Image (tube, coloured by chain):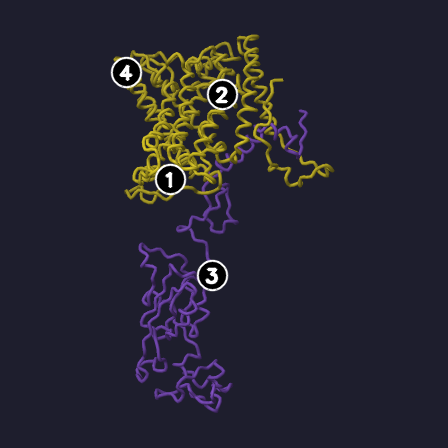
Amino acid sequence: MKALSVTVAIGFILGTIFVLSAVAYLLGGWLQQWNLAWVSNLVILLLGFVMLIATFLTLAERKWSAMMQDRIGPNRATIDVPGLRGRPLGGLFHVATDALKMLFKEDFRPKTADRLLFNLAPVLAFAPVLALFAVVPVGPVVNVFGSRVGLQVANPNFGLLWVFAIASLAVYGTSLAGWSSNNKFALLGGVRASSQMISYEVALGLGLVGVMMAFSSIRLPDLIAGQSTLLWGSGEELGWLGKIGVPAWGIFLQPVGFICFFAAAFAETKRAPFDVPEGESEIIGYFVEYSGMKFGLFMISEFAEVVILAAITTAVFLGGWNFGFAVDSSLARFLDSKDLGWLVGALYSTWFWVKVLILCYLQLAIRWTFPRFRYDQIQTLGWKILLPQALANLFISGALILIDPSLRTLAVVGILEIGFVLALALRRREPEHGHPSDDLPLDATTDHAPAPLPGAAAPSHH
Amino acid sequence: MAYKASKNPTDDLRERLYLPELLRGLAITTRHFLRNLFNPRDTNTDVVARKGANLVSTVSYPEEKAPYPPGYRGLHRLVPRDDGKPRCVACYMCATICPAQCIYIEAGEYETNDPATQSRVIEKFPTQFVIDELRCIVCGLCVDACPKDAIRMDTGTHAPSEYTRSGFVWDIPKLLVGPPVSHPSDPWNKRSSSSRPSHQHTEAHTRVGEGLVQLKLPGGEHHSRTEVTDQPIPVTRFLKD
C-alpha cells in the first residue's frame, strides 16, 4: 500500500515535470514568432522549475533526513478540506506553513546594523544564484509548429564562463550580510564564507576545464551535443532502441573533474559538510541577525544553489537530457518533426529533471551522512588536494585528448578510475585477527574506523 | 587486487582515498531512506518488537500511545468518600510539603452535630482545593504527606492539553474524580449508633487512639480535646455491620 502510494507520488511528480516542460515548449513556440521564447523560458524554468524544486527541497531536506535517520519527519500540517482532512500527504502542507511563517514573521533589523547593506545582502545572495541558471539548457532545440525552440533562457558564446563569473558574485551577499549585521558571530560567519568560497573557486573552474577541452566548447548545448555521441556502440540502429553503446558522458571522460567540480560546488553552496560559515552549533552564521523573509531568501538561495549545481553537473557530466546508452538516435529523429517535436522535447526535459532530482537527493544525502569538516580540513581539501589534483587531471587529460582525439583513451582511463573507486568501496574489509601491532579494538574494524583528513589522496592516473 | 585491509586509517587505501568510504556512507543512508520510503511503518508501540523492513522507531504519540509502566501513576485526584465528598480534611499538609507550592486550600467547617451526614465526626473540609498543574513537579510528596489518603496520583493522566493556562488550574470539581475509597479506620465508620460518639477524636491505627500508648503532654495535663480512655478500643467494634 505504501509502496503503491509512493510510486503514485513519483509518477505524479514525473507527470508534472512532463506537463510543465510541454507547456514551456508550446508557449515558447508561440512566443518565438516574435523571438520571445526566452521570456517563457525565463518564467517557466527559473520561477517554475528552479524555485518550485528549491521550495520543495526545503521540505525534502526535513522529510528525507528523517527517513535516513529512521524518523517520521514533518507530518502534522493538514488542510481542513473535505477529502484532505487529516491527511498530511507526506508533510506537503509544511511547505505552505513554512512560507507563511517566513512572510509573517517580524522583519527585525538590529539598530546598529548598516541599513542599506543589511537590506541589500539577501538580494545579493539570492539574485546571482538564480541568474546562474540562465545558461543551463534543459531540453533540446526542437521544432514546435514551425519555429525552433530550446529550453534555455540564453545561449551566449561565453557559456560556462557566465557560471564562473556569477558564482563568484554570490560571496558578496554572504560576506556583506556578515559585515552589515554588526554582530561578531555574523562577521565570523561572513569571513568564513568568503574565505571558503574564494578557496574553492579555483577548483570549481578547473574541474570543468577537462570537459571543455574534450568537446572544444564552453557553451553548454555544445557540451550536451558532444555527450550525445557514442564512444563505442553498434554501428547500425537496432529497431526502436536506436544505437546502443557507451556514451561520451563527462563523468566517463572526467571522473576526477566531476569529483573536483562537485566537491567545490558543494563548498560554494555552503551546505554540510562544508557548512562552517553557518556553523549552527557554535556561531549561527552570517545570517544570525536576519529574520522573516530576508532569512528566507538566504535559505531559498541555498536550496536554489543545490538545484542549479545539480543542473550544471547534469549538463556537463551526466549527458544533459540524453538517455545515453540507447534510444537517443531513434528519438532524435522526431526532434525536427513538426507535430511530435515538442513531445519528444518534453520527454528529454523530463529525463533531464530526473537526473537533477537524483543529484539533489545525492547532495541531501551527503549533507545528512557526513559530519562537518574542520576549517583547516576545508582549506586543506581545497588548496592541497583538489587544486593539485585538478591541475594534474588537466595535464593528463589534455595529453590524452591530443594523443587520441576520439576521446576513447580518455574514457578508458576515466572508466578505470571509476572502477577502481567502486572496487575499493564494494570490497568487504576483512578483520585481521590477532595482529600484534594493532592498537585499535577489533570492533572498530567493521565499519566505523575514524576517517583521516578528507580526500587524503586522489585517484591517480596510473 | 593488491588491496590489503588494514585497521589503521592512515595507511588504509580506502580511508585515504576517502571516496570509497564516502560511497559506503552514502549507501548506508540511502539504504535506510529506501527501506523507510517504500515500506509501511509498524505501529506497534513496543518498538523493539516491531517487524517489517521499515526501520522507523518512532511512536507517533497522540495517535499511538505506549502503555504506561505498572509503577506509573499520573496526575492528582482528590479521593471521594462513599458519599461523594472529598476525604480531605483540609489539614494543609500537602500544601505545606509541596516544594512547588502549587496547592492552595481554603478550609471550611462541618456542622459537627448534624446527624444527617457522615461528616459529623470530621471537623474540616476544603471549600477550595486548587492545584496548579503547570507548577506541579509531579514529585508525589503531597500523596506521601496526606494523613487521610485524600489525595492520590493514580489517574493515569499524563499530559492533559488545554488552550489556556488557566485550564491547568484544577479545582475541586475537576479534581474530585475516580472511585471512592474507604478504610476501616475512617472515623465515620467507628460508630455504633447515631448518637454522639463517646470519643471525640480517636483514630484506629494510631497507637495513641487505640490506647496502646499513653499520650504524654508537657506539664502532665490534657491540653488536647482528645479524650484518652483507659480501656483499649478494638478496631472491629467501630466497623459497620
Left or right of A257: which side holds A173? left
| Residue A36 marker | 4
Tell me the quarter of the picture where residue A321 sits: top left
At a point 39% along the width and 56% down the height, the residue shown is B159
Mark 2 is surrounded, within 10 Å at the Cα level, by few (under 14), some (14 to 19) or many (20 or more) other residues, namely some
| Residue A202 marker | 2
Q: CA distance from mark 4 to mark 1?
A: 38 Å
Q: Are marks 4 and 1 on the same chain?
A: yes
Chain assigned yellow: A
Q: Position of residue A129 (x, y in %)?
A: 38, 25
The amino acid type found where label 4 is placed reads Leu
Q: CA distance from mark 4 to mark 2?
A: 36 Å
Q: Which residue is mark 1?
A: A91
Look at discs 2 and 3 and give the one toward the viewer: 2
Say which of A224 and A439 sits in front: A439
Question: Outermost residue, right direction?
Answer: A436
